[in-house]
Amino acid sequence: MKVKNLEIVNKKGLNEVLYHSPKIDRQTSSKITGFASIDKPWLKYYKEGIDKTEIPNLSLYEALIESSKNHLDDVIFVCADRNNKEITYREFIELTDKIAASLKALNLKPKDNISSTFKDTLEGIALVFAKSKLGLIEHFIDPSNSTESKKDLLENSNSKVYFLEEDLIDVDHDNIKNNYNAENIVILPNLGSSRVSNKYKDTISFDEFLSYGNSIEVDDIYKYKKDEVSSIMYTGGSTGKSKGVMLTDYIFVSKYYREMLSDWKWGRGRKNLCVLPGIIAFGLSEGIISPLLAGETTTLVDCLQIAKFPEYILEQKPQDVACSPIHIEFLMNSPLIEENTDLSFLEMLPCGGDGMTKESDEKARKFFEKHGAKDSFAQGCGFTESAGAFCYGLGDKNLPGYMGIPLAGNISAVFDPNTGEELPYNEIGEWAVLTDTAMLGYYGEASHLTKNALKMHDDGNIWLHPGDMVHMNENGQIAMHDRTSRTFNITGLKVYPSTLELFINSHPGVKKSVLTGVKLTENSNTIAITDQKVPIVNLTLDEQYKGSEESVADEIDAILKEKAPSYIKIFAYIFRDALPFTNRGKIDYSRLESEGVQTGLDKKVLIRKYN
């Protein structure tokens, strides 16, 4: 991906550090150089030449039509909360075309903005493909955002229409239009019904909206340019403020092709379960678009009910499920899963959205093997900035504690963040990836941050820097160490939370821990330093250790004294009933930092001596 294809990136001054790799021509040298960007060691797992495969420049709507050829009567969606109603390609395309006609009736033209907030409703998914047919730009707004946040995002998006699922209306019904800043508000049906009640003033019910297009024909399919924005997806904001990521239809289509080239198991005759929200990149790409384009039947359930994941698994018996570590945790700890419960129907569970320790990874693998689903589970990793998965792999492509190998056609390397030099295998550094699924840049207020994520390397390409510290082994497998956004300083010395969490989690009583840097205030009731962050640990305990928090804290202090740098001294331990998660299945780091050392009914705070 050359910089000339990125209209929003100025080639001059893109980044201060010029990232560079050794000047070795891999085409004329058979020797392993020790540098991943040259060796590309992951290619040994793929068919020769697969990384050179040309990806067709299709819009999502064009890809849908292509996928449906000779299969119009195949079932591609099952709506679990609508009595398992089955939807064929033919019915889905008809719904998509009706939505496109109604959007045209509202005088929307190519490059106009719309916004949507939905779970994984059939109508919300059809909207994604309808906007593609017309060449619109869709902003995906997280249902967990506050009303005020939604209002701000809508105002910044200049959306002409806002599609809001009925279940997600969180304001006074008589003042919806005042609270949501959009010309037209269309109420989408919820998961359990294809119809909307008529109790909302100044809004358009979905049935009424569809009627607008009754006499409208949309004969022409909009042809997006390869680098033309079609979707704005917002990062989770779990480690900071949410940013709008500008993505193209080509990016989503390329992601699907690269997954198929990388031996993902999507395919006709298979069953997929979608448990991730379609308003996030991982959910939309791996939960909906890729299986749909492959002809796989996807069951739609309430993706915000994470605790019901075990129930969904046992009821639907899917082969494929893109999920997060919290889904796996609920499954492993569910009373519904008995000693002899058979899960052999599970074949592919790409797990991402948040990191897992090597121990948690191994525990999950043993769980699935015990229940007949060996080699079905493995960690992967991706970013909103590349529309979901970047690396993954089952079997020998993925070791415990690693996140697999780059998808076919992707390139991965590790760099020294201070010098820009590429690092050899097994050294920890800043992760950079080269892929045609990288975003165009950040939208609106966050646009100035684009230069921190898209950086010029001396090969003339723009690489995506997702903000992770990783190492890569000689097979091209990637292991996460920390998010750069989570690191902080103590008297000028770096603190790497994930490394310290490994030490803390080694205590037999600790189920899960999260270390954050918190800036303390005068009212913290401590002798706190107020001009720098101090390390605070939030953690959960196994049942037999509850009531022994003081002893556990003392023992963790002793572990850290032995294994951690001498400047690491924990200011407070906060023992919680459960750690907070976002609806994307990620630890809510922002919430933990904002809460600081507040006490509460669901937690016990132990302030340590801090000098």
Image: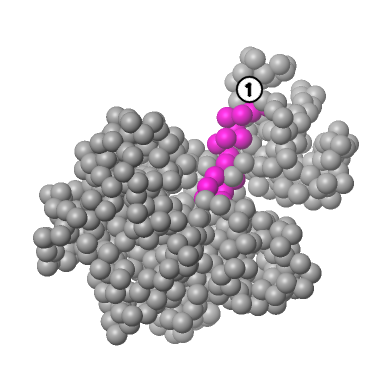
Mark 1 surroundings within 10 Å by alpha-carbon count, few (fewer than 14), some (14 through 19), many (20 or more): some
Q: Which residue is more in the foreground, 563 or 362?
A: 362
In the depicted view, which residue is nearer to us: 32 or 584?
584
Q: Amino acid at mark 1?
A: Leu
Magenta stretch contains residue 279: no
Residue 577 image offset from top left, x and y in percent:
73, 40
**What range of the chain is rendered magenta?**
582-597
Q: What residue did someone put label 1 on?
A: 520
Specify the quadrant that holds the N terminus. bottom left
Q: Name the side, left or right, on which 227 lies relative to 417.
A: left
| Vertical placement of residue 183 versus 62, above or below | above
Residue at the top extreme of this rendering: 522
Horizontally, residue 218 falls left or right of residue 300, namely left
Residue depicted at x 77% and y 26%: 607
Q: Is residue 146 left or right of residue 198?
A: right
Question: In which quadrant will I find the C terminus?
Answer: top right
Does residue 281 sit above or below 113 in this rendering? below
Residue lying at 87% horizontally and 46% vertically, measured from the top left: 544
Measuring from the top left, give residue 337's x and y in whole percent: 72, 65
Is 392 above or below relative to 294?
Answer: above
Where residue 591 sits in the image (x, y, percent)?
A: 57, 35
Q: Which of these two is toward me, 451 or 359?
A: 359
User: Is residue 491 in sight in this rendering?
Assistant: no
